[in-house]
Image (cartoon, helix red, strand yellow):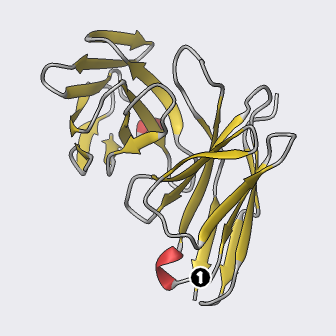
């Protein structure tokens, strides 16, 4: 079976930095994606890592270690609008659909 | 450029009934995937359509079926609805061979089975 583990909830202060971890055990691995979903909204693509290392896109960065089956999403300069659920998701092979974790609910407080 | 659109937005059905949900992919996308998202959970893959064929299928019963049309739009049909089918149904579109393997999700259809 496939399993992705991420914390269920994280709380952080506005302006701070927060890291959301994801560990995975899957039969095959092609890449790791991160999605943001606001309450009542659609998941929105944030980042994709196929190789080890850090990918940076503005205030968001994502890291992957294939040898450790581990990745994280780093959010800097937190804003209230970043309060949402964040999902890590694995591609098992090139054109396969995503296998999602259960999501981490991030609450940004003043 | 219109993104992924889905209809209807909300739907209430009775146990045992049948439902059809619709999805139009993002312009330029020809692959459509359907996901079921229960409350407080991550999306679960149902199936994927490409070139009007079901290309891959997740662990869902045959009550869940679909179709893709020549214009790449897609339908999800669920027969003999159960209370447990209540969820947000998401459609995602993508381009095979896209360099980033990203999928664009629609806003979803919220199905409530009573």
Reply above or below: B95 against B48.
Answer: above
* Relative depth, front residue between B29 and A101: B29
Residue at 41% of width from left, 28% of height from top? A93
* Relative depth, front residue between A43 and B80: B80
Residue at 70% of width from left, 74% of height from top? B11
* Relative depth, front residue between A92 and B104: A92
Reply above or below: A75 against A13.
Answer: above
Q: Quadrant of residue A19?
A: top left
Measuring from the top left, give residue B63's x and y in whole percent. 58, 73
Can you identify the residue that label 1 sits on? B81
Reply above or below: B106 against A18.
Answer: below
The answer to whether residue A51 is left or right of residue B49 is left
User: Taking the image as drawn, is residue A79 in sight?
Assistant: no
Residue at 51% of width from left, 59% of height from top? B36
Disc 1 crowd, CA 10 A, few/some/many (<14, 14-19, 20+): many
User: Taking the image as drawn, is residue A92 in sight?
Assistant: yes
């Amino acid at each position: 079976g496939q399993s992705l583990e991420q914390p269920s909830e994280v709380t952080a202060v506005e302006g701070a930095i927060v890291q959301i971890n994801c560990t995975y055990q899957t039969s095959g691995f092609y890449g790791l994606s991160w999605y943001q979903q606001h309450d009542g909204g659609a998941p929105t693509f944030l980042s994709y890592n196929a190789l080890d290392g850090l990918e940076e896109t503005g205030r968001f960065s994502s890291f992957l270690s294939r040898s450790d089956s581990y990745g994280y999403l780093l959010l800097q300069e937190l804003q209230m609008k970043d309060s949402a659920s964040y999902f890590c998701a694995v591609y098992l092979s090139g054109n396969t659909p995503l296998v999602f974790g259960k999501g981490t609910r991030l609450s940004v407080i003043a | 450029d219109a993104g992924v659109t889905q209809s209807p937005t909300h739907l209430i059905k009775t146990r045992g009934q049948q439902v059809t949900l619709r999805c139009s992919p993002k312009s330029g996308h020809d692959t459509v995937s359907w996901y079921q998202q229960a409350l407080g959970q991550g999306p679960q893959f149902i199936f994927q359509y490409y070139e009007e064929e079901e290309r891959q299928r997740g662990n869902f019963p045959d009550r869940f079926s679909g179709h893709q049309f020549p214009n790449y739009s897609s339908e999800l049909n669920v027969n003999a609805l159960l209370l447990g089918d209540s969820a947000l149904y998401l459609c995602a579109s993508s381009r095979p061979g896209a360099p980033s393997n990203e999928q664009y999700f629609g806003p979803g259809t919220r199905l409530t089975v009573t």
